[in-house]
Image (cartoon, helix red, strand yellow):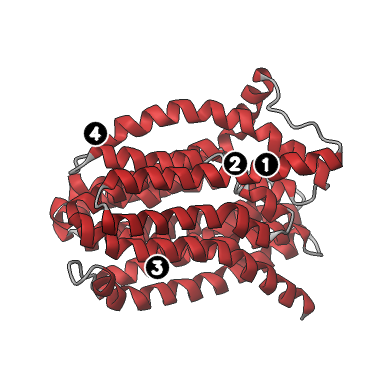
Amino acid sequence: MKRYLRFGASAGMLSLAPLLISGATFISVPILLGTLGTDLWVSIAIGQAIGEIARALVVWGWNSIGLTVVSPMEPAERLRYYFASLLPRFLVLIPVAIGCVVAAYAIPSEDPASAVRMAFVGAVYGLTGGWLLIANREPLLMVICDALPRAASILIASVMLLFIPSPDVYGWTNILGSVVAVAAVYTLAVRRSRAAGVTPGFGTFSAALAALRHGLPIVGSGLVMVLRISFAVLAAPFLAPAATEVIALGDKFFRWANTAMTPVLQTLLVRIPRMTGSPAHRAVRGLQVAWLGGLLVGAASAAVIVPASSLISHGLIQLDVLTAIPIGIAVTMVFVAGVTGNSVLVMLGRVRQVFAAAVTALIVLVATAAILGPIFGSTGVFWAFAAAETTVVVYQTVAVFRELRRQREGI
């Protein structure tokens, strides 16, 4: 019982961080729609989707599988691991920033410049060191150093829109929030490095390139997942232009749910490798917890989408049940896949299966959305998304049980 209470306390504290971000964005959406209108809001949403892809590239897997790697380390070793991650991510940030500009102007929208600024918000946040605080089991510092600056920037930018209805103000203020969040964790790490006898530094160029090569399979699976999540908004202007606003709002609900469940996922990523028992026992326990948590968060997400969509959009955008159900299914599957892939399969030494499942799901998503989107609009796009995320879970689960059978038979 104590173990479950400790897990709940840790996950609950970590939940404060995404709750702050989700709460701030939840407040910002009606303000954005009311002050800037739906067209400019869609441009901002497209930029945020591009920014998610940029963040996944710049972070290079340090915030996902990196948690599994650093959780058994000593504090000094974790600091070295964090500092070693900075130069590689700076090197990735440069081409990613250029890619953000190209993508924002390539996708049809009312204001590509606003899309660029919001994409930069995600790209800069890719330098985050919040995962270090999670590995250190310091959720309060995670809130103060990482979440609070970002949430505050969203709220401040939203309030400023009431007086200065300009997307420029909103974009630059959010970029500042990402910069402060990254700098706060770095400053804390530098201060601690002195007491731990660790020399803070960016390392050598050759070491940075080696780290990027080593992390390529890891970032590949994470990137493909973000591509799937961002696909609906980015493809909407091409597949279902008349339903772009509906798809953008549905995407927001999915992202809010994804953000809310992230701390629980991250806590599981840290705790499952530390469980007692054989790898097989830990794997089965991990799957059980994944399905329990996934079903709960998915059902809750689907239940609130329909009544909340009209409320936060001032009645401009209404999501129906046929849209809410596939979003709820997708939320469930993303939770299950997060535990099954980033924890169980990694623990069993099957990282390649994580990447293969992600690629297979992306193919399913593109193929089904290309067919269903033009016919059924937003409903078709979200059902394609749900089918893709279900594909990930099926693929990963089969891979887990095949590996467990292989280990039992001593192959």
Q: Which of marks 4 and 3 is in front?
A: 4
Secondary element under disc 4, as helix, strand or loop, is helix
Q: If the image is split into quadrants, where does the N terminus sit? A: bottom right
Q: In which quarter of the image is residue 112?
A: top left
**Residue drawn where x is 55% and y is 40% of the image:** 59
Disc 3 marks which amino acid?
Answer: Ile
- The reply to whether discs 4 and 3 touch (Cβ–Cβ < 8 Å) is no
Q: Nearer the N terminus, badge 4 or badge 3?
A: 4
- The reply to whether discs 3 and 1 touch (Cβ–Cβ < 8 Å) is no
Identify the residue position indicated by label 3 in the image: 329
Q: Examine the rendered structure and indicate whether residue 213 appears above or below residue 348.
A: above
Identify the residue position indicated by label 4 in the image: 106
- The reply to whether discs 4 and 2 touch (Cβ–Cβ < 8 Å) is no
Disc 4 marks which amino acid?
Answer: Ala
Task: Give the CA distance from mark 4 to mark 2.
Answer: 31 Å
Secondary element under disc 2, as helix, strand or loop, is helix
Identify the residue position indicated by label 1 in the image: 187
**Residue drawn where x is 58% and y is 66% of the image:** 15
Q: Nearer the N terminus, badge 4 or badge 2?
A: 4
Res. 304 mark: none
Determine if residue 325 is in view. Answer: yes
- The reply to whether discs 1 and 2 touch (Cβ–Cβ < 8 Å) is yes
Please state which of residues 69 and 59 is positioned toward the viewer in this rendering. Answer: 59
Determine if residue 383 is in view. Answer: no
